[in-house]
Image: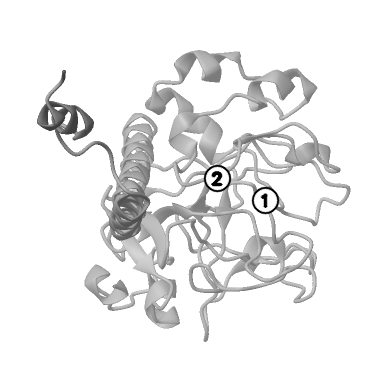
Amino acid sequence: MRNPESRRRKRSPLGRQGFTLVELLVVIAIIGILVALLLPAVQAAREAARRSECVNKLKQMSLAAQNYAGANGEALPVGTPGQGRHGLFTYLLPYLEQQPLYDSIDLKSTNARNDPLRMQVVGAYVCPDYPEEPVITTNPSTSAIGAITTYQGNGGTFVTGGGRQELLASPSYGDLPLNGAFRWSEDGRALREVTDGTSKTFLLGEFVHIDRLPGLYSSLPGNIRPWMGSPRLASTSERVPYEFKVAVYTPNTAVDREADETPYNHLPFGSFHPGGANFAMIDGSVHFVPDSVAIDLYKACFTVDGEEVVSVGDLR
């Protein structure tokens, strides 16, 4: 006959097994709180890494422009030499370890022979924060098909008073000043002409292709800019460079180019980084310029010889 005490011992658990439902819910809630606390920090760290990579790409392009100048009479690459012609981003290729691609390009025009080449993504030309595929394969405008660049050159700005020089274009495209690092010209900007100082003059900045107000181009890909060349337009008086932009607005200004009738050449620089955009100076330094920058100080960094008194620190 078994001892009753022995039977009780067999029925009693040797130790506590598992969690109760309440305890499980508490653990899940704690994990959820920790994730909620850590997620912003993780996202911020990832954004900081992408922004740092973007800075490095701008430094690469600035160094490439300096090396180009060293090999070409101390002059920067041309901005846009004319319709259907190659410009800035084509001529930087050999100095960005893209010599084979450069050698394959028909430099006489941006014709159909170059179509397969214009689809090639050049890593240095795309910010890591760009959220879509950097190749546009279909578009109502055939000149907008190709691998994009999320950067544009400094096309200058309009100054008040005497001495204003510009190339006139149709109202939809916008006039072009002649006082930036890049211009609509057969000749590149000579470094000796940058009398404001290479450390105080923008070379390149970020550009996102989309408008910040709801409209036709408010969603990606927007009105895109391939890195290869400018389109051939119907009228020779129409100038729409795919290589540089004119400083009319501060970074990321909210515009709707259709409703506001903002000329294409005057669209604002901008980025997918929160709060501003990265800009490279001609000397190779890179600075983050906030959206809130004073417009007069911002424009001062777009002229090569405006004699403005400005410090890069003033832009922050």
Alpha carbon separation for disc pair 2 and 1: 9 Å
Q: Is 210 situated above or below 136?
A: below
Residue at screen point 34% across, 57% down: 29
Residue at screen point 77% across, 73% down: 261
Q: Is 296 situated above or below 194?
A: below
- Residue 23 picture location, percent across and down: 29, 53
Residue beneath label 1, please? 220
User: Which is more toward the observer, 233 or 14?
Assistant: 14
Q: What element carries label 1?
A: loop
132 relative position to 109: left or right: left
- Residue 270 picture location, percent across and down: 51, 61
Residue at screen point 27% across, 50% down: 283
- Residue 257 picture location, percent across and down: 73, 68
Q: In which quadrant of the rendered image does the N terminus lie?
A: top left
**Label annotation for residue 61:** none
- Residue 259 picture location, percent across and down: 79, 74
Figure coloring = one colour
Q: What element carries label 2?
A: loop
Q: Is 106 situated above or below 192?
A: above
307 relative position to 77: left or right: left
Image marks 2 and 1: residues in contact by CB distance under 8 Å: yes
Residue beneath label 2, please? 131
Q: Is 297 situated above or below 130?
A: below
Q: Residue furthest front?
A: 1
Mark 1: which amino acid? Leu
Q: Can residue 124 be seen in this view?
A: yes
Residue at screen point 31% across, 57% down: 26
Q: In which quadrant of the rendered image does the C terminus lie?
A: bottom left
Q: Can residue 282 be seen in this view?
A: no
How many residues crowd around disc 1 within 10 Å: few (fewer than 14), some, or many (20 or more)?
some
Mark 2: which amino acid? Pro
